[in-house]
Image: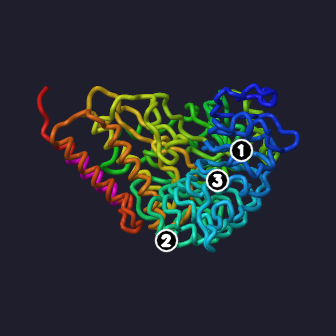
Amino acid sequence: MQTLATLLAGGYRGAGLTKLKLGERLADGQLPQAILDDLGDTLEHLDLSGTGLASLPADFGARLPRLRIAFFSSCAFESFPAAALAGCGQLEMVAFRSNGMASLPAEAFEEEDGAGGSRPTPLAKRLRWLILTDNRLATLPASISRCGCLEKCMLSGNRLEALPDAMAACQSLTLLRLSANRMDRLPGWLLTAMPRLAFLSFAGNPCSSAAPSATTTRPSTASASALPHIDWKQIEVHHVLGEGASGIISKGVVRSSSGLSGESTPVSGMSTPALQSATTTTVAEDAVAIKIFRGALTSDGTPFDEMAANIAAGHHVNLVRVHGQIRFAEEEEGGEEDEILEEAEKTKEEIQDAFKGGIVMELIPPHYRVLGQPPSFASCTRDRFDDRDDSSPLSVDAALSILAGVASAAEHLHGRGIAHGDLYAHNILVTGHDKSSKDDKMDTHAILSDFGAATLYGTAGLLDPLLEKIEVLAFAHLVADVLGLIGDTATDETTTTVGSRLQDLHRQCEVAEVAARPTFATVVGRLTDIQSEWSSRPRTCA
């Protein structure tokens, strides 16, 4: 991070700076002129989040011709600065989270062409990633349809009642966040005419369901049960494991609780007894993970919707097992929503004061590793695998077990009217795939985690199959990623056949016509067949 004082003193002049991040408040809310004068020829990444910036000069785009990424979150823009940004011909990512923004002018994306018509602005031609989370937008302009490269659009926490029909022209749209708005229905084109849409969340809208229907749930071989309430006084917090946008996860125990018994039932043909034990905690006072949700909006939605999805998901061997929901006494419920735990460890009392509500989950053993890494600015909507914790290639057994487990978990969720919304490799925990024996199918286990973008949509609507098939496209991306991780671990004819079968499955899951994609039940069946063929292959003696 650079400093405002150094910038104003000309300390960065001629330094060839490509990225500038300032954290200090701007007293007048104006853009420092030194950014344009001293950095205009080189600056590609500008982050002024939290500075109180309220406006941009009209020549902003012309003075920063190389700018590709701009963050203005937690600033004071009441309206999208269309005049300043429309001319940014290289800008691919722009963020205005938490600005109190109430309007997005059509001129941001469309301009007159001089012949009585209109054309896309330079911004619209290149924009891939638009973040407008947590504002006061009630409408979007139809001109957003000019953003033909738009892949990721974050709109959670606004006041939107509908999307413009013209937005159907954004055919590159892959990830869309609509949670915590005021939409009483989803437009039909969003579910049928967006061939690349794979990651959708709309929890916290009138059109989403408060809970999956108990009477219309499709049959599932995975068990489900009502979650017990666990009194906060029974919980002993040991230390913090990690902190995310929606809350904090700590290691601890639940004293004298009978709510931690029971077993996850594996899906027939998709798991083994060894995998059952990997996700089952049966003894009270065993170590558990305790997630306490803060009352703050995330880019994906609200912690309250995330908690509801965790509770509604039920038990499945390829999901993180949730033992119970935390019950606070009325006088114990959390304090101010904007209190954030910034230190590495907090006492039980500090956690209690800062948060509202929580769940008790199984503690994932430390030998589990994430399958991939989240998207970068460059990859936008696709995971990365260049800096995995375990860089060894996947065996065919491991690849099939991972895909089968995740597909089974997704089938279970959609059977309960739940869309995960973020079915990515970086949300999948795996273990056992680095074993030397490629024939030990009991070693590899996958867990689909993170319900931050999940939506409870129920199972009674006519469009429910389409919601499932949108997520099938996300699974197609996962199949492609896993195929890439198999690498050249084997080249025999049987392995080549398995690869071909997985490539066929990938093609079926990614077809542009949403309704033509298979359901997760069909995907599970096809993976079971592939596993059976692989298991019955002729073995050669060592």
Q: Which residue is mark 1?
A: 294
Q: Is residue 438 left or right of residue 465?
A: left
- For the C terminus, give its image quadrant: top left
Give the tally of numbered discs.
3
Q: Which residue is mark 2?
A: 463
Between 307 and 122, the one lying in front of the other is 122
* Residue 261 makes an appearance in the image: no
Residue 531: say if magenta. Answer: yes
**Label 3: how many residues lie within 10 Å, few (<14), some (14-19) or many (20+)?**
many
What kind of element bears circle 1? loop
- For the N terminus, give its image quadrant: top right
Residue 525: say if magenta. Answer: yes
Structural distance between the alpha carbons of marks 3 and 2: 22 Å
Q: Is residue 148 left or right of residue 523?
A: right
Q: Are marks 3 and 2 in contact (CB under 8 Å)?
A: no
Q: Which residue is mark 3?
A: 301
